[in-house]
Image (cartoon, coloured by chain):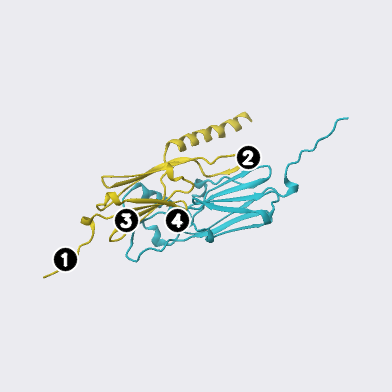
Amino acid sequence: MSLIRWNPTRELAASPSELLSIQREMNRLFDTFARSDDEATGLSMWTPTVDIAERDDEYVVRMELPGVRKEDVRITIENNVLTIRGEKKQEQTVSDDAFRRVERSYGSFQRSFTLPVAVRADEIDAVAQDGVLTVQLPKAEEARPKQIEVKVK
Amino acid sequence: MLIRVAVPSLLDELINASERTIPTSPAVDVMENEIESVVVAELPGVAKEDIAVTFERNILTLSGERKAAQIPENTRVLLHEQRPRSFRRSLRVPHDVERTAISASLENGLLRIVLPKAETAKPRVVEVR
């Protein structure tokens, strides 16, 4: 199983996007309507958070995608690797709107997960509700736990 | 072996305790035009009835709780990044607001609060005679 818990601090390796997120946090500390600068840089990478649960017959993946339209999400499965990618687009606003504050991250995202056992690719189901995407992946028949009764003679 | 098991779980407990008590600060966008200000906050997975929005002395406060998802029996959690926790955010609005006309809606994990400007806060054109 190659799933590793996402640890934000581990990624603090001085990449520009991480520095930006620190700046964003600092901006939040000073809670005024002051315009934040990170929109000007155009760098807005983000990583949606994910829960993954396993049951006897399926995997359930829940990804937080607030404000992402379902037509902007693509889910693919290849060689047991589930990939969810898409884009969070900034909504159109009236031309005289002034942005006082931009903290939400926009742009494309992508996350991939290697599933431990085969799933039935043609029966994967995905539902978007309340800004949460839920993907259900039924396990292939041969991957499900089986109970075999052995008669004792 | 025992220590290797006990220490991480103790750390987990400490982290969980701090996450339960310290509210998170949801990301917000704020737009302003001549007639109103609009605040958009990201609250994925939060139910409408678990959100409170208040406005007092020009401070807009949104608070509430993201409740834990129901985990059915016979479920093993493989990855857990979405922690149930409370959230709270206050913003000072830099103009007078028509308080009775404030509205809030929740859609696709976004809470949108519209704060219409009071007459006194709207730009006024003065004609030169």
Q: Amino acid at mark 4?
A: Ser
Residues at discs 4 and 1 both on one chain: no
Residue where numbered disc 2 is placed: B75
Q: Nearer the viewer, residue B117 or B41?
A: B117
Counting other residues with Cα less than 10 Å from the Cα at mark 1, is it few (<14), some (14-19), or many (20 or more)? few
Residues at discs 4 and 3 both on one chain: no
Q: Nearer the viewer, residue B1 or B48?
A: B48
Residue where numbered disc 3 is placed: B37
Q: In what element is the residue under mark 2?
A: loop
**Dot 1: chain letter:** B
Left or right: residue B89 versus residue A122 is left
Q: Residue furthest front?
A: B100
Q: In what element is the residue under mark 3?
A: strand
Q: Note whether residue B87 is visible.
A: no
How much space separates mark 1 and mark 2, taking CA atoms?
A: 68 Å
Counting other residues with Cα less than 10 Å from the Cα at mark 2, is it few (<14), some (14-19), or many (20 or more)? some
Q: Amino acid at mark 2?
A: Thr
Q: Amino acid at mark 1?
A: Val
Mark closest to the chain's N terminus, 1 or 3: 3
Image height check: is B62 above or below A80? above
Counting other residues with Cα less than 10 Å from the Cα at mark 4, is it few (<14), some (14-19), or many (20 or more)? many
Q: Amino acid at mark 3?
A: Ser
Residue where numbered disc 1 is placed: B126
**Dot 3: chain letter:** B
Mark closest to the chain's N terminus, 2 or 3: 3
How much space separates mark 4 and mark 2, taking CA atoms?
A: 32 Å
Q: Which x, y percent locates residue B122?
A: 23, 59
Query: Nearer the observer, disc 4 or disc 2?
Result: 2
Residue where numbered disc 4 is placed: A105
How much space separates mark 4 and mark 1, taking CA atoms?
A: 40 Å
